[in-house]
Image (cartoon, helix red, strand yellow):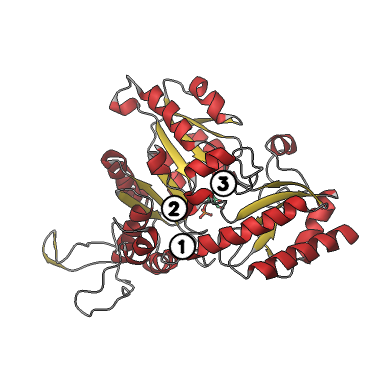
Amino acid sequence: MSGFGTLAVHAGAPHDKTTGAVIPAISLSTTFAQSAAAKPVGEYEYSRSANPNRDGFEQAIAALEKGKYGLAFSSGSAATATILQSLAQGSHVVSIGDVYGGTHRYFSKVANAHGVETTFSNAVEDELASLIRPETRLVWIESPSNPTLTVTDIAKVAGIVKQANEGRSADEQVFLVVDNTFMSPYVQNPLTLGADIVVHSVTKYINGHSDVVMGVAATNSDAIHEKLRFLQNAIGAVPSPFDSWLAHRGVKTLHIRVGTASNNAQAIAEFLEKSPLVEAVNYPGLESNPRREVVKRQHRNGLGGGMISFRIKGGAESANKFCQNTKIFTLAESLGGIESLCEVPAAMTHAGIDVKAREASGVFDNLVRLSVGIEDKEDLLKDVEQALQSAASQ
Ligand SMILES: Cc1ncc(COP(=O)(O)O)c(C=O)c1O
């Protein structure tokens, strides 16, 4: 069994059998020649159904997520939509209150219109057993969540789902989906903790260079894979060969990028925790984190990852000023790239959520979210320090 770095570099990336090229060519052809009717020359027929670049990327993600199968989509949202489309009308889903806003929107405004109902819980570990109904088919969680970085004990949730499945037929099974976008497969592998499907917005850490929008799902189950692969082709929300190639190139350095971003974020979170200009810091790597024991169990070496959120003193105005005054951190949405970004969730990514619900899940007006990149730690620390001072003095 190879280590993570070896798999990241080599999984799904054999050298070209005819030319010896160590990096695969981009296979742009939409169709593939056949020697007789329904007898393709090679493995491929039509690029929506399968494409060499997408195949290579899918194999790499399956290996890194310790799954048997990977399926790539044109965005993380398309992966979500395809999984939800696998549910029959009348199915029920349980999710977390602070699930990614786009996923919340899909559950409540799209799946709902197709007869799939979702219950959102702000205490899923405690409430899940009582929220699962006879028609429940999916439990969908994120850990850590966005932007409060609330950690959920994935193995505990998987245990509750397993118990609920006792005595249910194959068609009535409840599946656990974990959105692992925030941690990436380098920090956490939900399939090994009991999840049935792991999903990613590849747009974030997996591609890692803020130049591709893409999604992926991985599973160990033959039945789930068969169903989702059918829908991947039938719905057709697939990534282009070029995007698949770029994302596959990006994932080869995932361990280096996420390791560096996590080390940088740890130093910044520890600095913020000591600052008199900061009210509170959410970061899974801090020893003071209330779920630190869970983090140590489910994250590689207890790593905290590259995402931090903190409440700055001085309210919404200070949060905005902090983000306007950073010189290395760019004020922008998204996350998981090589470059550091900052944003104010209440005014940006989470502005669409009703204030009461937003504050109930910890997204206050003075919350700042950082996506820490791989620049030099000392430069990032200096940038955060000067932006805090500027926000306080204006
Ligand atoms: C946790 C999480 N899941 C899913 C998505 C959706 O991914 P995409 O933007 O690639 O559709 C995002 C996007 O921000 C996300 O942060």
Whichever of labels 3 and 1 marks the residue nearer the N terminus, that label is 3
Please give the residue where the numbered disc 1 appears in the rendered image: 254
In-image side of 217 versus 375 (left or right): left
Image quarter in which the N terminus is found: bottom left
Q: Is residue 244 visible?
A: yes
Circles 1 and 2 in contact, beta carbons < 8 Å: yes
Residue 102 got which mark? Answer: 3
What amino acid is labelled 1 in the image?
Answer: Leu
> Which residue is drawn at the image coordinates 28% and 78% (left, top)?
21
Circles 2 and 3 in contact, beta carbons < 8 Å: no
Q: Is residue 319 above or below residue 110?
A: below
Neighbor class of circle 2 (other Cα within 10 Å; few <14, some 14-19, many 20+) is many
Whichever of labels 2 and 3 marks the residue nearer the N terminus, that label is 3
What amino acid is labelled 2 in the image?
Answer: Pro
Residue furthest right in the image: 394
Please give the residue where the numbered disc 2 appears in the rendered image: 185
Q: Is residue 73 above or below residue 56?
A: above
> Which residue is drawn at the image coordinates 71% and 43% (left, top)?
363
Neighbor class of circle 1 (other Cα within 10 Å; few <14, some 14-19, many 20+) is many
Query: Is ligand 1 closer than 8 angstroms to the Cβ of mark 3?
Result: yes
Residue furthest bottom in the image: 19
In-image side of 275 versus 43 (left or right): right
Residue 61 got which mark? Answer: none
Residues 55 and 250: in front is 250
Which mark is in front, 2 or 3?
2
